[in-house]
Image: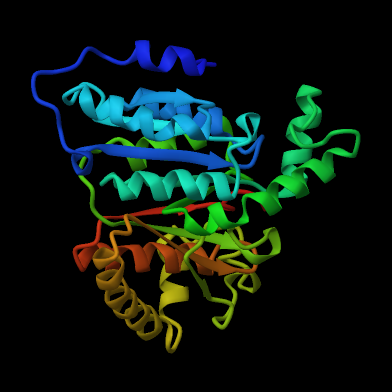
């Protein structure tokens, strides 16, 4: 880990022209211990960010100012904040408020995961949680979650890593932050309700009102990506009309999100198992959103789990 003392000396040499704070691409990374902050930091480095890990709250503004003064050499800077330096809750809020007061526009990335998954990850590496003390591992996780509740609510992007492996998380970060073009981008994510609702969803669409292809013998082994399954799902009365109307509604919402500077939108589309109805509907909804001019990707969280 980079020690705070190394922060000032580790920056690239200052360029000839100092940029303004509003010209910086500044990302603040925080979230639950064990949820994948280190993987996120490495992924950000891969796409050109100057990454500072475990920085005390008192040095966040100074770090941003040093990056600003570098004249563009560290225009894309990411600062990782976590409980190891006790930068939690109010401290994070104060640091972000101070940055904004000085003209910076940081993007907040919060990394999260289900408690059961965090427990398994900690047990696999035989480490104590930073807030565990003499209590149980679950107690430390619960304490950290309470302390970071407000920070999660302030996040521009929440990445739920419950069902992501290291490579999938790295690819997700590189996909989102790999471009310097700042515009709203959407992810349409299919899922199965029996596996839980995605924790990072901004909107949840329930497609269980449609007949289930699972009960059609010829369609059961196939997925919603199969043209016959998609035709069956989208050919049901009301299906296409519902998706058209929902896409139109999201288009209206997107206008407000853009005005507020939001850059990420996740729409979760669910059915029972995440295999047929949600997959076909997510593909169609993503196509409708892309056709409206919104950069959109589609992903299928639970495809293949059955």
Rendered position, 252 above or below 191: below
The residue under the point 41% across, 80% down is: 235
The front one of 298 and 254 is: 254
At a point 31% along the width and 16% down the height, the residue shown is: 11
Regarding residue 42, the answer to whether it shows in the image is: no
Q: Quadrant of the N terminus?
A: top right
Residue 218 percent across, percent down from the top left: 57, 66
Q: Residue at point 50% right, 67% down?
A: 269
Whether 60 is drawn above or below 1: the answer is: below
Q: Is residue 41 above or below residue 223?
A: above
Q: Judge by depth and name the residue closer to the eye, 205 or 34.
A: 34
Task: Please identify the quarter of the rendering in which residue 193 is found.
Answer: bottom right
- Could you say where residue 133 lies in the image, as x and y percent from the top left? 85, 33
> Is 268 situated left or right of 31 in this image?
left
Which residue corresponds to the image point at 64% horizontal and 68% vertical from the top-left?
272
Q: Is residue 117 left or right of residue 95?
A: right
Q: Position of residue 77 (x, y in %)?
A: 33, 30
- Outermost residue on the bottom side: it is 237
Residue 296 seen in the figure: yes
Say which quarter of the image contains residue 294. Answer: bottom left
Q: Is residue 123 left or right of residue 93?
A: right
Query: Residue 54 lies in what quarter of the image?
Result: top right
Please state the total of marks drawn on the protein image.
Answer: 0
Q: Using the image as rendered, state which of residue 211 and residue 46 is in the foreground.
A: 46
Q: How is the image coloured?
A: rainbow
Of residues 236 and 126, the one drawn nearer to the viewer in this rendering: 126
Of all residues, the one furthest to the left in this rendering is 16
């Amino acid at each position: 880990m980079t020690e705070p003392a190394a922060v000032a000396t580790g920056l690239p040499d200052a360029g000839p022209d100092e940029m303004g704070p509003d010209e910086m691409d500044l990302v603040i990374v925080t979230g639950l211990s064990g949820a994948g902050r280190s993987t996120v930091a490495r992924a950000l480095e891969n796409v050109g960010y100057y990454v500072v890990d475990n920085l005390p709250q008192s040095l966040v503004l100074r770090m941003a100012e040093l990056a600003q003064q570098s004249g563009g050499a560290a225009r894309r800077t990411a600062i990782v904040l976590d409980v190891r330096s006790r930068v939690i809750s109010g401290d994070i809020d104060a640091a972000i408020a101070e940055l904004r007061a000085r003209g910076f526009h940081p993007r907040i990335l919060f990394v999260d995961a289900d408690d059961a998954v965090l427990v398994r990850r900690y047990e696999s590496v035989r480490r104590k949680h930073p807030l565990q003390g003499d209590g149980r591992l679950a107690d430390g996780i619960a304490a950290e979650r309470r302390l970071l509740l407000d920070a999660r609510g302030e996040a521009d992007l929440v990445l739920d890593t419950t069902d992501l492996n290291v490579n999938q998380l790295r690819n997700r970060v590189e996909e989102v932050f790999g471009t310097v073009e700042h515009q709203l981008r959407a992810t349409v994510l299919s899922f199965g309700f029996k596996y839980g609702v995605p924790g990072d969803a901004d909107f949840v669409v329930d497609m269980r009102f449609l007949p289930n292809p699972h009960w059609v013998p010829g369609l059961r082994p196939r997925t919603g990506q199969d043209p016959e399954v998609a035709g069956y799902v989208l050919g049901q009365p009301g299906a296409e009309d519902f998706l058209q109307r929902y896409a139109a509604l999201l288009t209206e919402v997107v206008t407000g999100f853009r005005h507020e500077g939001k850059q990420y939108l996740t729409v979760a589309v669910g059915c029972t198992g995440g295999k047929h109805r949600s997959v076909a509907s997510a593909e169609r909804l993503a196509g409708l959103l892309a056709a409206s001019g919104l950069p959109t990707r589609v992903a299928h969280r639970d495809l293949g789990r059955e």
